[in-house]
Amino acid sequence: MAPILTTHDLARTFETKRGTVEAVRGIDMTVEPGEILGFLGPNGAGKSTTLRMLTTLLPPTRGTATVAGHDLAREPALVRQRIGYVAQSSGVDPSETVRNELMLQGRLYRLSKAEAATRIEALAADLDLTELLERKCAELSGGQKRRLDIALALTHRPEIVFLDEPTTGLDPGSRADLWDLIRRVRSEHGTTVFLTTHYLDEADALSDRLIIVDDGRVVAEGPPEELKTRHGGSPDATLQDTFIAITGRGPKKDDLAPVAL
């Protein structure tokens, strides 16, 4: 089976008053269908820029990529039809109901009203939103909003969904619920998940494989246990210690606190 995502020498530079900034210096990676991939790196490593390129929000300066069988540069519209994207902050309209937000998303992806209505009921059942369909988005908790964000990203049955720090700001219970949801999205629907997160316990718990970037390049990749053994000295090493050994830098300060789950 062909990879669902590939990149070769993917790079992005920005021109500033101080000169050229190389945000991404040449990323080579492959993601397999049905994989949960954790994409990690210190602040300023190029994660967000890479994610924006892969989701067609930012054109690459050089390099090539294919996403869900389509060329990123030549076929961005076809890429967008095959992917789902959950941004760091929710984009739902607080004045609309959950049902109306899902209906609008379905119609934007050219589902008929009947098809969209059927899809809404299925997504609501899968993501525990049925009792919330008539509620205004402004009345949702943080965890409920994130479930709605993921439902919106899955409306058109994408082959790969990009989750950009999906649990930031959630309480421990909501984080645990969202972890279960991410696992179910993959196991029940075969959806590939491309996850960026600053929570190393989250990456360790969810990811089949990790790609760690620093200074705009891939510096390590492999299953969490393999990276712990290779760089942390033991499969029982923490991913935090392994991450620091690879990059020489730790995650953000707030992420060093233990999380009760």
Image: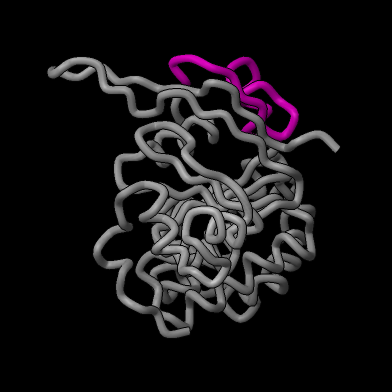
- Residue 104 visible, this angle: no
Number of numbered tags placed on the structure image: 0
Q: Residue at x 35, y 39 (%)?
A: 45
Q: Residue at x 70, y 52 (%)?
A: 35
Measured as percent of width and height from the top left, residue 205 is found at: 57, 69
Q: Residue at x 44, y 74 (%)?
A: 140
Q: Quadrant of residue 127 in the image?
A: bottom right
Q: Quadrant of residue 17 in the image?
A: top left
Measured as percent of width and height from the top left, residue 144 is found at: 50, 73
Looking at the image, residue 240 lies above or below residue 180: above
Residue 70 located within the stretch drawn in magenta: yes
Chosen colour scheme: one colour
Measured as percent of width and height from the top left, residue 221 is found at: 57, 45
Quarter of the image where the N terminus is located: top right
- In the rendered image, the residue lying farthest to the left is 18
In this picture, residue 70 sits left or right of residue 104: right
- Residue 52 visible, this angle: yes
* Nearer the observer, 116 or 234: 234
Residue 117 located within the stretch drawn in magenta: no
In this picture, residue 98 sits left or right of residue 238: right
Looking at the image, residue 256 lies above or below residue 166: below
Q: Which residues are magenta?
A: 59-80
Q: Residue at x 44, y 27 (%)?
A: 58
- In the rendered image, the residue lying farthest to the right is 1
Measured as percent of width and height from the top left, residue 32 is found at: 73, 43
Looking at the image, residue 151 lies above or below residue 72: below
